[in-house]
Amino acid sequence: MQYRTLGRLQTKVSALGFGTMRLPILGGVEAQIDEAQATEMIAYAIDNGVNYVDTGYPYHGGASEPFVGRVLSQGYRDKVLLAAKMPTWAVNDASDFDRFLNEQLSRLHTDHFDIYLLHCLHAGVWAKLRALGIREWMERAKADGRFVQLGFSFHDSTEVFRQILDDYDWPICQIQYNYMNEDFQAGTEGLRYAASKGVAVVVMEPLQGGGLTRLPEPARLLFDRAACTRTPADLALQWLWHKPEVSIVLSGMSSMEQVRQNVATANHSGVGVLTPRELELVDGIQRSLEGLRPIPCTQCRYCMPCPHGVDIPLNFRLYNDAKAFGPNSALLSKNIYLMTPEAARSGSCETCGECEPKCPQGIEIAAWHKRVHKEFTA
């Protein structure tokens, strides 16, 4: 296993982290984890050098945390950095800070978390948490030993990402990032900004919900013609590890074969590992996949600001990703849509028409908003 440095913390962390949001399940029931298979997967990863395990309060309908706790208690807890996340959307009162943290410690059978993240921060949630005194609470909870380091996971714009980074002395953050997300949410700009401040960057959704492992026909033809010796998954993961600003890449693996493949890929990862020809191939795949998105939105933001608060480019990006990258990516897009403040969603469009004359692509924005909202709330 290759190891990287966790930002200014100087902790050595495996290039690959184990995400526990997509564990194998039984009977198609999300909360019914196939515990025998999933236990074998986590054990294999740790036995082969993975030392970072990430879980979250809502994963697998709440079943992920107790399951991970049971697995790690079988002699693995001291071998990993354990990361959990506070469900910020469920916080209504300052007393909820301690309530959730203590509940999660109990669920995971541990007396402390190595990393505790504020889950799914965006501008509205951060403002609410600040008003409730989250920054003062973070210092107290860290001092009493219930977690070693505190950070946040993020879903909002690059601008908001920079604002949150500047608002507290964060040691670590988690962002959605892959070669199709360079200008989405925190993006490459946010990645570099965090790294410039010494903040460790944990990458989630490195394969676009699995979409980058199953390239659609035009992109697959490019891949085949290039005679690339890597698999699409290997290329996408190495594209991330190629960047010195990336501290660790999380993968939500759902089969033993995926674990074996990703561990093998991580074993030959490193900064600058991709050749110029491979980087050119990624650029070609990016352009090809962009062409599969049904809404011809270029994210230029000429339509913004919306007088009613709708984030037009965000909604269209989520819809395009859902259509271009298959069912797992569609579920990811839907989840992000539903976690987005209601006022910013397509469903809040008032069809005033103010944005449409500003669009260089001539997109019928109001009509697309109706389709986007229907898609994600069906």
Image (tube, rainbow, N blue to C red):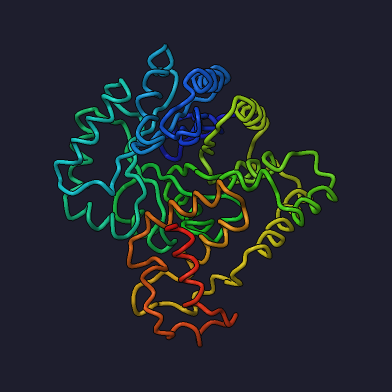
Q: From this view, report whether residue 121 is shown above or below residue 257.
A: below
Most extreme residue toward the bottom, as rendered?
A: 357
- In this orientation, which residue lies closer to the viewer: 188 or 179? 179
Question: x%, y% of residue 205?
Answer: 53, 45
Looking at the rendering, in which quadrant would you find the N terminus? top right
Count how many numbered circles sit on residues in the image: 0
Question: x%, y% of residue 248?
Answer: 52, 37
- Say which residue appears at 58% left-offset and 19% top-offset: 48
- Occupied quadrant, residue 4: top right
- Say which residue appears at 22% left-offset and 56% top-offset: 128
- Say which residue appears at 38% left-offset and 32% top-offset: 83
Question: x%, y% of residue 234?
Answer: 68, 39
9 sits to left or right of 89: right
Question: x%, y% of residue 158?
Answer: 44, 61
- In this orientation, which residue lies closer to the viewer: 114 or 12? 114
- Occupied quadrant, residue 305: bottom left
- Say which residue appears at 22% left-offset and 46% top-offset: 91
- In this orientation, which residue lies closer to the viewer: 258 or 192? 258
Looking at the rendering, in which quadrant would you find the C terminus? bottom left
Q: From this view, report whether residue 52 is shown above or below residue 169.
A: above
Q: From this view, report whether residue 25 is shown above or below residue 371.
A: above
